[in-house]
Image (tube, helix red, strand yellow):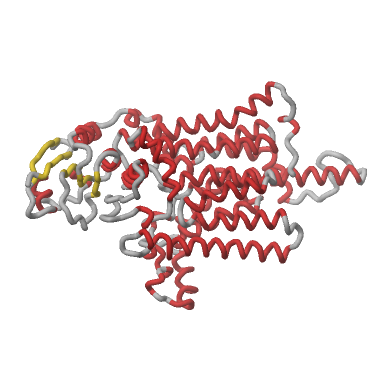
């Protein structure tokens, strides 16, 4: 087992500070994430329909019902969209606090919680100050901040699970490594891929040390079992819950879509072509993923666990997956931070072994340990001495380009006239009705109504209410907001309940 740093042994004040530091860093990160998320919600600036979708799903779980989410589609059980039964854990909290803010606070807590094992492991094996720097760098890292800024997503549950699992692996606590990885089976179908792979790397290290061929076979088997697990979820489990009996995201895989029957030969040619499409954006994403850890993660084999998530995004034909926006980089981010800590530990152990060997051979102490000072070794020495501080410096610098910088802006803290108009409109929609609405109003209304997204064209039964910001409604130039509503639901009458023409916010009630 790696040796604990001497400076954190004992019972003095520094040790007490080091004991609580991981929780203090996590608490600070939680406050930042919650501020970003809640202030965005108060400004009614949702970036997608996700917060509304998950609010409606968790509301159903809170009342012991299946997550039937009309926002996603009529008769849509959300387990037929993606596999995320872990959302049930939020049900009791939503029952007490029935608001989208509950989801945002939970997500902020989950993202921040990963700082605890990362900081603790870094302190224990690298020293207090390096541990503080690495933990803080994680808390400020752009990939995590982007996830906190993006409404809500189930992947937040994976972040602490991965952090605790990989830090347990670094400590050679293999039982906890596997136990912490198991929840990934219930977070999302693509994350289930990681569970057999993590089990495989545990077996390779614990049971087959030094047996290269066996290690390779075990790792290949782990990857194959992971692919099989994900395939079972997308081909059997999710279609079982889907009203159309299908997995609805095959089209995003381009030629990976089994309905195209492309054949193995065409797959060999078209998959690399899809991967290379937009390669500049994808290269930047890889660089930006490694930059917060000053590329130290490349020193650890754990960095390979970030590859499946990146490859899945880069093969996808949707350009929105390729860059650094939204929440897509949070899983690779927590992996590279764990890998960076492991990489520094491996460098430290290598230097200690070299020093011991030099002492045994009665060679000079210090830098001259009898081994040639290669360029790679020189870089390793620099990473060991300064890597943690560099990580912190990079994290602080990048806050100027990512959402943490918004906290310095006056408009972040004070909702606009448009946001105030939207809130007044929401208040006029009674609880328990059906309402068709736009993205900005979806979360608040989904918490207490049967909400529908106005962008869906397959709404069969006209809703009781229409509440929308006409600028984001798909308005096709009808003479008035009422004409727009009547055109959407011909043969039904609606009466205006609220209008704010200055901000183009309206509410209509069905009267027939």
Q: Is residue 323 left or right of residue 98?
A: right
- Identified at 35% across, 50% down, the residue is 66
Residue 325 image offset from top left, x and y in percent:
41, 48
Q: Quadrant of the N terminus?
A: top right
Residue nearest the viewer, comparing 104 with 402: 104
Residue nearest the viewer, comparing 43 with 198: 198
- Say whether residue 184 is visible: yes
- Say whether residue 48 is visible: no
Residue nearest the viewer, comparing 71 with 148: 71
Furthest residue to the right? Answer: 362
Q: Quadrant of residue 381?
A: top right
Residue 109 image offset from top left, x and y in percent:
47, 36
399 versus 170 height, above or below: above
136 versus 331 height, above or below: above
Q: Is residue 50 left or right of residue 501?
A: right
266 versus 389 height, above or below: below
Q: Is residue 354 left or right of residue 103?
A: right
473 versus 249 height, above or below: above
Q: Is residue 65 left or right of residue 360?
A: left
Residue 437 image offset from top left, x and y in percent:
22, 45
Residue nearest the viewer, comparing 300 with 102: 102
Residue 265 image offset from top left, x and y in percent:
48, 78
- Identified at 15% across, 40% down, the residue is 507
Q: Quadrant of residue 443?
A: top left
């Amino acid at each position: 087992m790696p040796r604990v740093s001497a400076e954190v042994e004992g019972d003095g004040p520094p040790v007490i500070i080091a004991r609580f530091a991981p929780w203090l860093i996590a608490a600070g990160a939680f406050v930042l994430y919650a501020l970003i998320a809640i202030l965005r919600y108060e400004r009614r600036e949702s970036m997608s329909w996700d917060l509304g979708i998950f609010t409606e799903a968790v509301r159903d779980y809170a009342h012991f019902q299946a997550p039937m989410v009309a926002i996603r589609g009529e008769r849509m059980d959300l387990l037929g969209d993606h596999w995320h039964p872990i959302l049930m854990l939020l049900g009791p909290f939503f029952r007490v606090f029935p608001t989208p803010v509950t989801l945002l606070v939970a997500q902020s807590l989950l993202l921040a919680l990963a700082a605890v094992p990362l900081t603790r492991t870094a302190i224990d094996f690298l020293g207090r100050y390096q541990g503080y720097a690495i933990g803080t760098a994680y808390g400020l890292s752009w990939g995590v901040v982007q996830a906190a800024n993006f409404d809500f997503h189930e992947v937040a549950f994976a972040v602490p699970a991965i952090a605790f699992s990989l830090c347990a692996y670094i400590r050679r606590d293999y039982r906890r490594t596997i136990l912490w990885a198991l929840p990934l089976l219930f977070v999302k179908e693509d994350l289930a891929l990681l569970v057999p792979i993590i089990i495989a790397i545990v077996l390779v290290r614990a049971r087959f040390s030094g047996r290269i061929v066996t290690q390779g076979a075990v790792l290949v088997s782990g990857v194959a079992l992971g692919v099989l697990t994900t395939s079972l979820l997308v081909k059997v489990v999710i279609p079982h819950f889907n009203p159309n009996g299908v997995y609805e995201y095959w089209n995003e895989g381009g030629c990976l879509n089994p309905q195209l029957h492309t054949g193995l030969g065409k797959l060999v040619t078209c998959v690399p072509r899809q991967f290379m499409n937009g390669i500049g954006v994808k290269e930047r994403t890889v660089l930006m993923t490694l930059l917060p850890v000053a590329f130290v993660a490349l020193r650890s084999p754990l960095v390979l666990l970030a590859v499946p998530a990146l490859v899945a995004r880069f093969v996808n034909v949707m350009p929105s997956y390729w860059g650094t926006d939204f929440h897509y980089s949070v899983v690779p981010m927590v992996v590279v931070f764990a890998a960076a800590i492991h990489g520094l530990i491996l460098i430290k152990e290598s230097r200690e072994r070299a020093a011991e060997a030099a002492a045994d051979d009665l060679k000079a102490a210090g830098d001259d340990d009898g081994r040639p000072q290669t360029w790679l070794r020189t870089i390793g020495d620099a990473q060991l001495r300064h890597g943690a501080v560099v990580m912190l410096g990079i994290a602080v610098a990048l806050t100027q380009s990512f959402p943490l910088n918004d906290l310095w802006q006056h408009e972040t803290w004070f909702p606009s006239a448009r946001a105030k108009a939207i809130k007044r409109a929401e208040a006029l929609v009674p609880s328990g009705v059906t309402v068709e609405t736009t993205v900005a109003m979806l979360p608040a209304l989904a918490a207490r109504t049967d909400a529908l997204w106005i962008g869906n064209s397959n709404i069969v039964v006209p809703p009781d209410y229409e509440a929308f910001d006409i600028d984001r409604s798909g308005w096709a130039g009808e003479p008035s907001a009422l004409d727009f509503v009547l055109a959407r639901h011909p043969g039904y009458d609606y009466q205006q309940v609220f209008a704010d023409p200055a901000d183009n916010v309206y509410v209509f009630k069905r009267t027939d």
